[in-house]
Image (tube, helix red, strand yellow):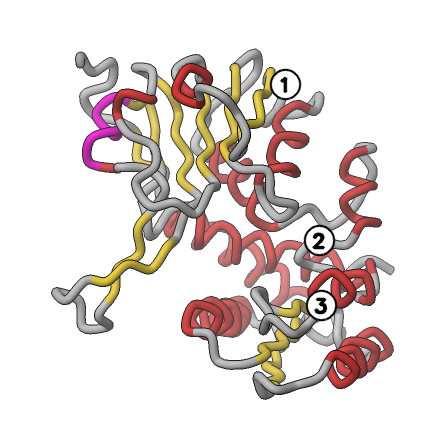
Amino acid sequence: MSSAYPTPLILDGNATAEQIREELRQLTVARVAAGRRPPHLTAVLVGNDGGSETYVAHKIKACAAVGFGSELIRLEATTTQVELMAVVESLNQNPMVDGYIVQLPLPDHLDAVAVNLAIAPEKDVDGFHPVNLGRMALGLPCYQPATPSGILELIRRNGIDLTGMHAVVLGRSAIVGSPMAQMLSRNAKPGNCTVTLCHSKTKDIQKHCLQADLLVAALGKPGFVTADMVRPGAVVIDVGTTRVADPSKRSGYALRGDVCYEEVAPRCRAITPVPGGVGPMTIASLLQNTWLAANRS
C-alpha cells in the first residue's frame, strides 16, 4: 500500500492540553486577583478500579496545575445506591463546588444512569446529563461531553479544516460516539462534516472506513483499525485506551488504542497517538467546563 503522507502530523494531545492549562491558569490568576475564589472541581470515586484511579489522579493534578480547587471523595466498593445518591445530592447543594464528576465505571450493583440523572445539570461538567446533551443537540450553550469536545479542540488548534469531510465514527456510546457524530455534523468549525456512525451491527465496517476523510475510533477494541481500513490521507483519531498485559512495563500493562498505530500512521495526513492523544484533551475539556461552571452566574 502506498502512503499519501510519509510524515503524518502527530496530533499531540499533551502539548495542546498544556496550552489550554496555561490559558486557564492565567484566567484563574486574574479571577483570584479580582477577589473571587478559584473554580472548584470535585471527583467521586467508588471502589478501586485501577484505570479510574489513574484518571482521577490526572484530573486532580490538572486542577492543581491551573490553580483550581479540587477534592476527591473516595467511597468503598460496597457503597449502596442510597449512599451514593446522598453524596450526589450534597454536592448539588454545596455552593463551593462549581462542578463535579462521578467517575465511571461504577461497581456493577450501582445504577449509573440514575446517578447521572441526579447530577444537577449546572454542575455536570462531564456533559453527560440529558439536559446538557439536549442543549448540545439544539446548538444551545451547555457543557459539552469532554472527550468529543477535546477531540474537536485538538483538531481546531492543529489547523485542520473539517468542512465537507466525510467523517466515520466507530462506536455509538452516549459518552463519545453518539455526541461525537452530532458535533461533527453541526454547522460549526470544527464541524460541517457528513457523518456515518458505525457500531456492532454495522455490515462491512471496512467499506465505510475506507470512505472516511476523518475516522474516529471509539470502540474499546485494541488494534481494531488496521491499515487496510484507512484511505490514504485520512485524519485518524484514536479514542481507545485499553489496558493490555506488557511484562516489559514496570506497571505490568500498557495502554493500547483501537488503531494499529505503526501500520496506520504512514497512510495518514494526521493521527493521534495512544497514550498522549485524546486522553489529555479530555481532561483539558473537563477543566474548561469547570471554568464555565464557576462563571455561569
Q: Quadrant of residue 44?
A: bottom right
Q: Which residue position is annotated with label 1?
A: 192
Q: Which stretch is magenta? A: 262-267
Q: Disc 1 versus disc 2: distance between alpha carbons? A: 23 Å
- Is there CB contact under 8 Å for labels 2 and 3? no
Tell me which amino acid carries mark 2: Phe
Q: Tag 3: Cα neighbours inside 10 Å, few (<14), some, or many (≥20)?
A: few
- Return the disc, 1 or 2, that comes first in the chain's sequence: 2
Q: Quadrant of residue 23?
A: bottom right
Tell me where residue 189 appears, x and y as whole percent: 62, 25
- 211 lies left or right of 69: left
Q: Quadrant of residue 107?
A: bottom right
What secondary structure is found at the residue carrying circle 1?
A: loop
Q: Tell which tag, 1 or 2, sits nearer the viewer.
A: 2
- 243 lies left or right of 77: left
Tell me where residue 279 appears, x and y as whole percent: 44, 53
